[in-house]
Amino acid sequence: MITQISKVLLLSFFLFSCDPNLVDDPIPIVNFDELVINLSFPDYIELNREGGYKDVSDLGGGVRGIILYRISSTAFVAYEKNCSYTPNEACATVEVHSSGLFMIDPCCASSFNFSDGLPTGGPAWRPLRQYRTQFNGNVLTITDEIIN
Ligand code: FES
């Protein structure tokens, strides 16, 4: 027979461990003002080539900032940096891996594709959140509208 204490210990394990947890909290929703980025500014030179990326958290959008990735000549993806796994943990923040090839949350080592934000390793089972982007001329706009 499972005692009360064992039940509590078991529950804590599922709630706070880095193992797959299918009753995980959702990423919090935040509203933020439109971010407007002029890609001709030297700060954004990386975004002028396909496959380029930049952490634009200094601009203030998202729950924990945003990583931009250029998919094609006309399309960008704006990823929320709050990890999709146990997002309320203090450490649940994604960054670009030092290889520059994918994103990773060093907290429990969940990794995510640049092309679609899907998890490729670690305990995360949901994709990273994406915000709407619009590209016009050389100006990229990111809004707080969630598109996935
Ligand atoms: S918080 Fe553990 S993988 Fe992101």
Image: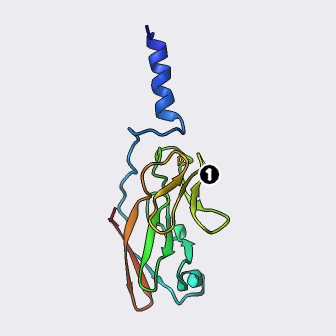
Q: Residue at x 47, y 77 (%)?
A: 71
Q: Residue at x 38, y 47 (%)?
A: 26
User: Of residues 87 and 32, which is closer to you in this image?
Assistant: 87
- Residue lying furthest top in this view? 1
Q: How many marks?
A: 1
From the viewer's perspective, is 8 left or right of 107?
left
Q: Which residue is mark 1?
A: 106
Q: Quadrant of the C terminus?
A: bottom left
**Mark 1 CB lies closer than 8 A to ligand 1:** no
Q: Is residue 33 visible?
A: no
Picture coordinates of residue 90, whole percent (x, y)? 54, 45
Give the structural element (helix, strand or loop) at label 1: loop
**Is 65 placed above or below 88 here?**
below
Picture coordinates of residue 99, whole percent (x, y)? 67, 66
**Is 88 placed above or below 69 here?**
above
Amino acid type indicated by mark 1? Pro
* Residue 146, picture quadrant: bottom left
* Residue 128, picture quadrant: bottom left
Q: Quadrant of the N terminus?
A: top left
Q: Residue at x 50, y 21 (%)?
A: 9
**Is 56 placed above or below 85 here?**
below
